[in-house]
Image (cartoon, rainbow, N blue to C red):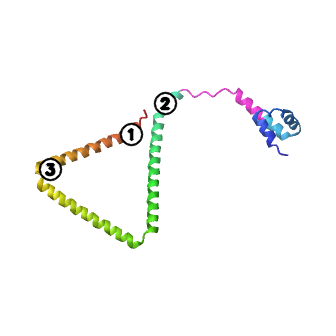
Amino acid sequence: MNHQLYETWILDGEAPAGKEAELQAHLLTCTECQRLQRGWQGAHHMVRTTPPAQPRPGFSRRFQANLAERRARLQYRQIFLVFLGGSAAALTVFAITMVLTGISTTPTNLIVGFTRAVVQASQWVNLAQTFANTWLKVVPLPINIAIWVALTGTFCLLCLAWAAAIWRIFTKGVQND
């Protein structure tokens, strides 16, 4: 016999309107459903009559003390997952690019392209050297020194600001206003 319908009614706590008599008639003949109803009523009674558990003394203090540590662990975990996800995405894009390049390009074209890139890079280096030599010959030395000091100082300040921002994020977390 299929008891699923009656078991559902028992576990819901009541039969649908007009089906109560059918459930009671079934309960008179079926020991399985009788056992289920007694067990469910006993469990329901236990849940209603059992008082809520009281926390151990000092729970709030312990919870507050561990809160900062749990938040830090969660933040480090999130940072790790973002780093891991970004790395996986970058590797996936790289792999897809390599596969598509390998499928659509012959080895000769790859070698020619690489050689062309190396030659262009060397031409850019020569152009930069020519520009630097001309600059150093035209612009007086004190101005060159001032420019280098300004550029180096700006670079150092930007690195310091970056390091301070990273330190703040790792020690205090991101503030959502």
Disc 1 residue type (three-letter): Ile
Crowding around mark 2 (Cα neighbors within 10 Å: few <14, some 14 to 19, many 20+) is: few
Identify the residue under disc 3. Answer: 144
- The number of numbered discs placed on residues in the rendered structure image is 3
Element type at mark 3: helix
Closer to the eye: label 3 or 1: 3
The residue at the point 34 percent across, 67 percent down is 114
* Residue 46 horizontal side relative to residue 147, left or right: right
Identify the residue under disc 1. Answer: 169
Whether the residues at callouts 2 and 1 have beta carbons within 8 Å, the answer is no
Closer to the eye: label 2 or 1: 1
Q: Which segment did they paint magenta?
A: 39-57
Q: Nearer the viewer, residue 111 or 28?
A: 111
The residue at the point 46 percent across, 68 percent down is 103
Height in image: 133 above or below 56? below
Element type at mark 2: helix
Classify residue 177 by image quadrant.
top left
The magenta stretch spans residue 44: yes
Crowding around mark 1 (Cα neighbors within 10 Å: few <14, some 14 to 19, many 20+) is: few
Identify the residue under disc 2. Answer: 64
Q: Position of residue 16 (x, y in %)?
A: 80, 34
Q: Earlier in the sequence, mark 3 or mark 2?
A: 2
Disc 3 residue type (three-letter): Asn
Q: Position of residue 146 (x, y in %)?
A: 15, 46
* Residue 126 horizontal side relative to residue 31, left or right: left
The residue at the point 48 percent across, 33 percent down is 67
Q: Position of residue 159 (x, y in %)?
A: 29, 45
